Amino acid sequence: MKRKLFQIASLVLASSTFVTLAKAAVVPKGTKLAKNQILNKDNSNEPSSLDPSHCRDNLGANIIMDLFEGLVSDDPVGKIIPATASHWDISKDGLKYTFHLRKDAKWSDGSAVVANDFVYSFKRFVDPKTASEMAYLAEMIKNAKKINEGKLNTDLLGVKAVNSNTFEITLEEPTPYFLSVVSGVNFVPLKKDIIEKFQIAWTQPENLVGNGAYKLTSWKIGDKSTLEMNPNYWDAKNTVIKKVNYVVAQDKTASYRMYESGQLDWTYGIPPGQYQNLSKKYPKELRSAPDLSSSYLAFNNTKPPFNNKKLREALSIVINRENFTKFVTGRNEKPLYDIVPFGVDNYTPYVPSWSMLSEKELIAKAEKLYKEAGYSRENPAVIKFSHATNETDRKYATALASIWEKALGVKTEIISEEWKVHLSYLTEKKYEVTMQLWKADYNDAQNFIALLQSGNMQNISGYSNKKYDELLNKSSKELNPLKRKAILFDASKIAMDDYSVAPLYSNKTYRLIKSYVQGVTFSSPLDNYRTKDLYIVSHDGNS
């Protein structure tokens, strides 16, 4: 999922109160703003859900960040800042967080946001009846894991409303990155009466009530979602952009054409293989930044043919990562052999010894493994490669199929699936192999390594290893950074040596953004920007 880069808060060993300034767009004095403050953003595809408890992809998160606001937020460079909570206290033992809500925080219908709105949201998120795909993110909250497993009642979750403006959270163990976790879109407040009244239809424009800087006014499936400024937002006076359209543009080439014609101000990525050309044509508009995300092949470990470790290993080692990023993606991303990308705090990705072999040696090793797995050129493996419908994923799947056929004789059927269907098939493990991208929810290696934990709904590979699970659980209790780093590394090494997945590269984010869209530095490693932080300056045709 996409989701967010955050600065990790230090573990507080003494009772502390945190107060920092938080504002929407800050427009420099003398700036001439455009008359029409309308932003048109490519959001690639339809989001899986606009229900924060069910959001599992960055497509939904991009919109939810505008519609809702959590206790804290991350600013455009990843620093944790106040949001609906104006300040917070952390107990001496690091187990209790007390958030003080803004007294002027309101829902889009004008009613006050209160602590019980967070209590309801957090309980709903971990309730097994909700079946949230991301519920594991809350496991550091007292009793959350047992509740989600159906062993305890939601009333025992470590959250409570001290009063209407004070929300308290108790943790299982001190968690240094906890503020980073709760800055995510799954932890925003929710209006109980709206959800109970409209049920599954509560996220429709005519029903949805949020507490963010914008409100949903239109949602045209396959076209765009339109959001307009929420006049009841606590910082509405500093919100400059009045309307934002999140446009569905699955085809990157079509998106680029819309950008050139002025229909889009902001693209979601760039066409594959176009980086060099676009960097010359639009040197000031092509934005790039390191990204705390990894791209990898997910194998369905639960059934043939990928329950065969030797086949998984053969297909993994035969891929030349450097050539793939140079000639296929065309963006020279950093080759990766660990599910954890480069740049994550307190972690150094695992690099296996086989990565140092020559291409000739790797092919020979892969051929041997392929034969031991029961296949040959005369009796080739026949596999199905699933991908979401878009030209980029199609190109990558085709390239990988070509690599495998040339090196080993593998026959690959490439299957294109609509985004929501693709996601459901992955969760239900109705696939064989697919290429995935995972963006950090918080800046910690555990967020990636937990993707392969037994029982995690995001573990689409179905991988299960008792020792791996034990190490991951042990890491959650270890407060010494160096010891914890070693534990997480050992855990990941186990899964990587089992070839549960095949990491390919550590990502970079690329966007074409019109020069008249201003307000942030566009340097967030997780491409996490809120419309309220932006503004549009005067330019041709909009002065």
Image (cartoon, rainbow, N blue to C red):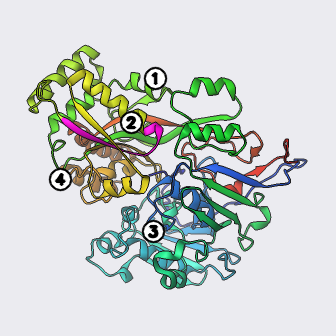
Q: Amino acid at mark 1?
A: Lys
Residues at circles 4 and 1 in contact by the CB criterion of under 8 Å: no
Q: Which badge, 2 or 3, is on the more N-terminal residue?
A: 3
Distance Cα–Cα, label 3 vs label 4: 29 Å
Q: Position of residue 36 (x, y in %)?
A: 82, 55
Q: Specify whether 271 is left or right of 424.
A: right
Q: Amino acid at mark 4?
A: Lys
Q: Is residue 390 above or below residue 401?
A: below
Q: Residues within 10 Å of mark 1 (few under 14, many from 20)?
A: some
Task: Determine which residue is flagged by label 1.
Answer: 326
Q: State the residue at coordinates (43%, 68%).
A: 95
Q: Position of residue 313 (x, y in %)?
A: 21, 33
Image quarter for residue 408? top left
Numbered marks: total: 4
Distance Cα–Cα, label 3 vs label 1: 38 Å
Q: Specify whether 120 is left or right of 521.
A: left
Task: Determine which residue is flagged by label 2.
Answer: 348
